[in-house]
Amino acid sequence: MAHVNDPETVERLLTTKGRWAVVGLSNNPMRTAVGVSRFVRDQLGMEIVPVNLKGEDFDGEKGYRTLADVPGQIDVVDCFVNSSKVGTVVDQAIAVGAKAVWLQLGVIDEAAAQRAADAGLDVVMDTCPVIEAPRIGR
């Protein structure tokens, strides 16, 4: 059965202050993750934690190579990776005890979404906070 985003879950994730680990966030200004992460931090008031292969910092935020390297609680793992690779990221999110996974617009993995849901994580898939926030008046 195909995953369907729950509007209440989307609203709660976008309005409850939290710590978002953004997987795939680097300093490449051509990447969508840059603008979306700034929106999540600056407009929605979330803490962002960059996670990328080089462990690069972003906009003064300390970067890490993997979710396992991030100290402390992660509320949302925001996935800016190819659909073929997102299952691994979702499994890592489950392993570190994240509360939710957000698979960005065009990032679809039904099996990974189901694994996350089965593990008790909130799941949002194939949409973006920049698209969803205006729908809830943010």
Image (cartoon, rainbow, N blue to C red):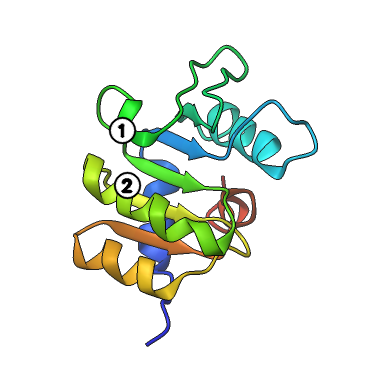
Q: Which residue is mark 1?
A: 68
- The structure residue drawn at horizontal position 63% and vertical position 49%, both measured from the top left corner, is 130
Sequence-earlier tag: 2 or 1 = 1
Is residue 85 depicted above or below 32 in this figure? below
Q: Taking 91 as reference, is 22 left or right?
A: right
Q: Quadrant of residue 33?
A: top right
Q: Amino acid at mark 2?
A: Gln
Q: Is residue 93 left or right of residue 50?
A: left
Callout 2: SS:
helix
Q: Quadrant of residue 9?
A: bottom left
Compare residues 100 and 130 and report the one nearer the observer: 100
Residue at mark 2 = 92
Question: Which quadrant of the rendered structure holds the N terminus?
Answer: bottom left
Task: Pinpoint residue 65: horizontal percent, then vertical percent.
Answer: 46, 28
Q: Position of residue 99 (x, y in %)?
A: 26, 47
Above or below residue 33? Residue 79 is below
Q: SS for tag 1?
A: helix
